[in-house]
Each structure stands twice: as structure tokens, then as C-alpha cells.
Image (cartoon, helix red, strand yellow):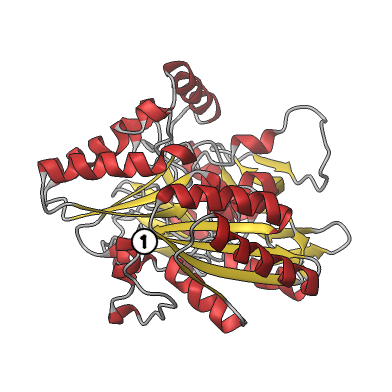
Amino acid sequence: MSDPVINALQEIVGAGNVLLGDDVAMRNTQWGAHSPCRAKAIVRPSGTEEVAAVMRLCHRHDQKVVPFGGLTNLVNGCLASLDEIGLSLERMNRVEEIDVTGSLMVVQAGTPMQTAQEEADKAGLFFPVDIGARGSCTVGGNVSTNAGGTKVIRHGMTRDNVLGLETVLADGTVLSSMNRFLKNNSGFDLKQLFIGTEGLLGIVTRVVMRLSAKPASHNVAFLAFEGFEHIIDTLELSRRRLGNMLSGFEVMWGDFIRLCADPKYGLHMPLSTEHAYYVLIEGMGSDLESDDRLFEHVMEALFEEAEVCDGVIAKSDKERAAIWAIRDNVEILADEGTVNFDVSLPIATVERYVQEISAKLTSENPSSRVIAFGHLGDNNLHVGVTGAGGGEAAMQRTKEIVYAALAPYGGAVSAEHGIGLEKIDFLPISRGPEEIELMRRLKRMMDPKGILNTGKVLG
């Protein structure tokens, strides 16, 4: 029996761009999940007008829609059920314009981040957001989750680099707020409704991204420590002495490094893997010679003042890439049975927090092990828990321990991956009841039929 909605969708985008049956099942809905997509269909529009037509149709028929980006989230933010349509923007993958004078890019939402980065580089500019999944995540997905990544300490979150948006609302209305200016206080800044709201209020189709000057210098150091207090000293000294040159400050616990050293990952370890902590420091600047001298001088000072145990400074692009490959080795998080978290909390409390959750987890399950690393310079910590035990009850208990421990520190249950379905129960740890109710009111106002990414974030 034919489905009138499917038939109408085929008329809008073409029969070849409405995937059904096995073509749907062969796709994952989340990175590392290895589970087939269960959507009723996947629709692939070619532009904003087709997205709008699809949403008008779905709104008229009360058809639920789940927006698909690069599907690199870790919170089931794009999970689709048998009665939902997956809306993939994979065909909307072009950089439309780069304005060198205005230092901006106009890009379609389905464009992979790496493509945007490479096009900016060709124009002599720098795309300011970077995450390990750059090859598969999309600019629209980055906007919808307010992605952060490794350059936040210098360039801020995605929100800080979005000048304008084009968005399709649940009823098919096209909201074009393609602002190109740093300063525009002409009424409400409506684009903020769609940044970090995970597709609940509208579907981002085009983005005006702010670009930066292409760095002339690029320095990376990899340092080892035995005490976490020395890492905090190192961060403070790096901020003070490198100033705006400091673009990345990544911390990795020893267990993370020792896992990365497994030969199956093919990574080169520049230092002994027996230390307690490791830090990657990145500096980018505008004067090659003076920046290189300053970076080396600051690294030398760190050995004297911050009790660095060992360290190395990359001397080539190849060496810089090899060091970053260690930090970007997210494959260890995809191992079966690993439960992954991304949280934020005050920098001074990070080590105490990791110790607390490690002690609690191992007291209840001696085989549990915490693997910690993150963007310490911007308060973001990633935690992987291995050996948590099988079954939903064990998984839920692990989440309760990790998230509940944030409350005394005023921590956030999500730093950059969003809430999706995975963290709904724990949102009240970070948001008050008045905030959550206002979120619900906004959802009801902008999507009264509740057809956009139903059930995510707010339940």
C-alpha cells in the first residue's frame, strides 16, 4: 500500500532522494553505534526551498522529522523511530562564498567541517572551529549543537563565530537572518534560537561563518607531569605569557595515553607513557620568527617554574600532526562497553572530580576504569568509563554517579555534545526548573505540533 506522504516527498526531492528499506537500514544514526537506522525514510533535499517544501508537507500531515547532520554526536540526538522521517542535508554541501575583505564564509549546512576549513585555507583565511570529527561532522550540525572543540580557548564556541543563519521552521517558514556584520543590534538576534538547540526549533540550512586571519606561526608542545597542580600552574603561565597566541590547551590522563599507545592505533608516542598526566599546548600567531622564539622561551620557563617532567616541541607539520593524532584518537571511545561523557566544571575542581567518580565507580564495580582527557583551558572534560558492566541498569547507574558528582561544583552535564535522548534525566542538574519550563514554552510556541526532533532534550 502506497504512502501518500512518501509519494509527495518523492515529488518534491525526486524519487532517488527518498531512501527506503535497506537504503535506510544501512546507515547509522550515531557515531560508533553500529546500529541500523530505523527511520521510515530518509529524505535528501538539495536546497532551502526543498527543505521548506518538505517541512510544509510534514507539518500538514503531522509527520515527525529528525534532522540529520554528520551523525557524529554521542547523545542519540539524531535517533529516528519507525514513524519518523530522517531529513539529511548531505546534498547541501557547498561553500557558496568567501568574502576575504569581510572575513566571512557563506556555507550550506550539510558541508563537512573539513571542507569549510580547506576552502577557508585556500583563501588565506582560517576557519575558527575544529573538532576531531572534522571529516564527517557538518557545519549545520556544529551550529545545532554549538560545537566547541580544540580551539575554544582562542576562538570560542561555534556560537561565537556565527554571524547569520537561514533556518526553516517546523511549518516550512523560511527565516532568513543572513547577517554579515559583527555589529547588528536591529531587534532580536533570532539566530540564537537555533544555535545549540539540537534541531528542536528549526532546521539550519545556510550559515554565515566568521573567519579569522590565517596564522603565520604554528607551535605545538607535548609535556608530561606527575602532579595535576602543576598543570594548573602551566595553564596560568601559558595564558599570561603566550597571550592571544595560545589556541589550544589539552590535558590527558596517563591511562588515556597508555591506551593510545596500543600498536593497533599506529600512533607515535614522543614521550614515555609512564607519567601521570600529559598536556598538549598549541600556539598560533602572526609573526613566524618572533612567535617561534616566544613559544620556545615559554616552554623553557615551564620546565623551571611548573615542574614539567619531560617534554618535546614539534619541529615540523608532520610532528605537529602526530602529536594532535594522539589527542584526536577518539577510537578508544568506540570500544564496546565504554560509556562516554562530556562535562564542564571549574578548572580547579577537575582532578578532585575525576578522583571522586573513580572511587565511587570502583567501589560499586571494581572492574570500572575512568579514562579522562579534555580541553582544560575551557573547562571541558571528556570521561570514558570502561568495564561498567552490561545491561541498562549498570549503564544508568554509571551515568548517575558521573552526573550527580557535578552538582556540588555547579558543573554542566553537557559541554559540547548536547542533550539528545541520553541526558534528558540529568538536565535538571545543570538547569533550573524555570529555565527548563521556558525551553518547553519556546518549543510549544515554535513547533506546536511537536514534529521536529520529537522527544529530544526536553523529553
Task: In the rendered view, tell whether residue 116 sits above or below residue 429.
Answer: below
Q: Position of residue 328 (x, y in %)?
A: 45, 67
Task: In the rendered view, tell whether residue 122 sits above or below residue 202.
Answer: below
Q: Identify residue for label 1.
A: 31
Q: Please give the name of the residue rendered at 43% of the width and 45% of the height, measured from the top-left corner.
A: 65
Give the residue type that dot 1 points to. Trp
Quadrant in which the C terminus appears = top left
Seen as rendered, the residue at the extreme top is 434
Name the image quarter holding residue 387: bottom left
The answer to whether residue 54 is seen in the rendering is: no
Quadrant in which the N terminus appears = bottom left
Out of 251 and 310, give the one closest to the viewer.
Answer: 310
Task: In the rendered view, tell whether residue 148 sits above or below residue 286.
Answer: above
Out of 121 and 200, give the one closest to the viewer.
Answer: 121
Q: Position of residue 233 (x, y in %)?
A: 53, 48
Q: Position of residue 105 (x, y in %)?
A: 75, 60
Disc 1 is placed on an element classified as: loop
